[in-house]
Amino acid sequence: MTPPHPSAYPSFPVSRPRRLRRTPPLRRLVAETRLHPADLVLPMFVKESLTEPSPLGSMPGVLQHTRDSLKAAAVEAVSAGVGGLMIFGIPAERDAVGTAASEPDGILNLALADLKAEVGDATVLMADLCLDEFTDHGHCGVLDARGAVDNDATLVRYAEMALAQAAAGADLLGTSGMMDGQVGHIRGALDGSGNIDTGIFAYAAKYASAFYGPFREAVDSALIGDRRTYQQDPANRRESAREVALDLAEGADLVMVKPAMSYLDVLSDVAASVDVPVAAYQVSGEYAMVEAAAAHGWIDRDRAVLETLTSIRRAGASIILTYWATEVATKLNAGRQI
Ligand code: PBG
């Protein structure tokens, strides 16, 4: 016997969610999440010894910049409407304590001053506040006699870095080193030196992630070993609530979860529990995965890029650090949404 067609039951199905998916304008009208250029922050690398910008093999489309090419790329990003720039510096000389990080003429501080003059009125200028790009051993802090990262000695260096970055014109300092007490110590140093308006963009929940792999090439990292004694274990979710609460108690102005895509549960928790802006960092390995798969023709690159960013917004980030910021902002301006 042939079963009756569904239309034999006039009221079946009771609800038809497909109605709102029928046309692009309907889908656009009911979209719960939208991307906007101003939500995107572009991380950028500037390298002291370069005479020409240098492409990164593991991050196709991303460059290590000279001071001049950094300025040009910053102008392009700001013209596309991105919300801010996060600057990383790669010095010519490294040593055990990362001296170049806190010198006014260290590459990162020079580049910040360049950008302050070039685009400082039109964007939010952010500086990575961490020692790993500047130390010869590649760790995010200074080492004690046994070779372990010395938390409190590192805080002293972070405070010196903070003052140099504030003097160079950074609006927000990205505390990415995962030392205990770093936000409070840096806040104290800033306030004590009259830099009361310099904000702290706290990498509050930062995991020891394999997805930072390509970044190590981007900053010519010297690291041997890993960062598991200071960055969080990917197995932990509740621990992030503790890290975020500590950073807020110490004076963080914004908090970040990093990486993004493998930590959307953490991001969602954080977004639901704090009253400051929440950011997520779509890190180098997340970028590289999509670019590599797309280069093989295995995924649709443009759709995948927007899907990753949309999912990070949907999980609760109001700000996203992404190496695609300029490209995506440009496309959004042209009205190309998903
Ligand atoms: C630390 C820092 C790192 C990244 C941003 N800030 C490296 C690390 O913690 O090992 C990684 C960013 C990325 O992978 O895109 N200065």
Image (cartoon, rainbow, N blue to C red):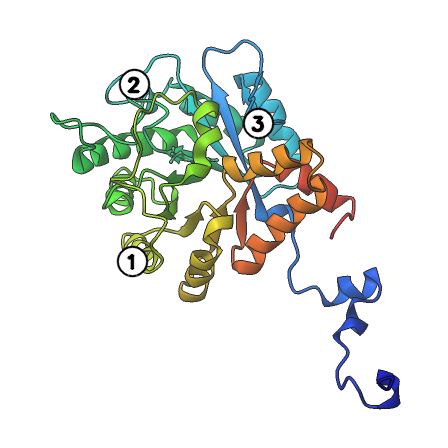
Q: Which residue is mark 3?
A: 118
Of circles 3 and 1, which is in front? 1
The quarter of the image that holds ligand 1 is top left
Q: Residue at x 27, y 30 (%)?
A: 160
| Location of the N terminus (image quadrant) | bottom right
The answer to which of 58 and 336 lies nearer the viewer is 58
Query: Can residue 79 be seen by looking at this rendering?
Result: yes
Query: Can residue 122 be seen by looking at this rendering?
Result: no
Task: Give the percent coordinates (x, y) of residue 21.
Answer: 78, 67
Q: What distance separates the C-alpha of mark 2 from that of mark 3?
A: 31 Å
> Circle 1 — which element?
helix
Q: Amino acid at mark 2?
A: Asp
Q: What distance separates the C-alpha of mark 3 from that of mark 1?
A: 39 Å
- Sequence-earlier tag: 3 or 1: 3
Q: Amino acid at mark 3?
A: Glu
Question: In the visual, does 93 lie left or right of 30?
Answer: left
Quarter of the image where one finds residue 159: top left
Q: What distance separates the C-alpha of mark 1 from that of mark 2?
A: 31 Å
> Circle 3 — which element?
helix
The answer to which of 331 and 267 lies nearer the viewer is 267
Q: Residue at x 39, y 23 (%)?
A: 221
The answer to which of 110 and 176 lies nearer the viewer is 176
Q: What is the number of the mark on residue 136? A: 2
Count of numbered circles on the image = 3
Task: Give the percent coordinates (x, y) of residue 56.
Answer: 55, 22
Q: Residues within 10 Å of mark 1 (few under 14, many from 20)?
A: few
Question: In the visual, does 4 lie left or right of 117?
Answer: right
Q: Which residue is mark 1?
A: 242
- Sequence-earlier tag: 2 or 3: 3
Q: Amino acid at mark 1?
A: Arg
> Circle 2 — which element?
loop
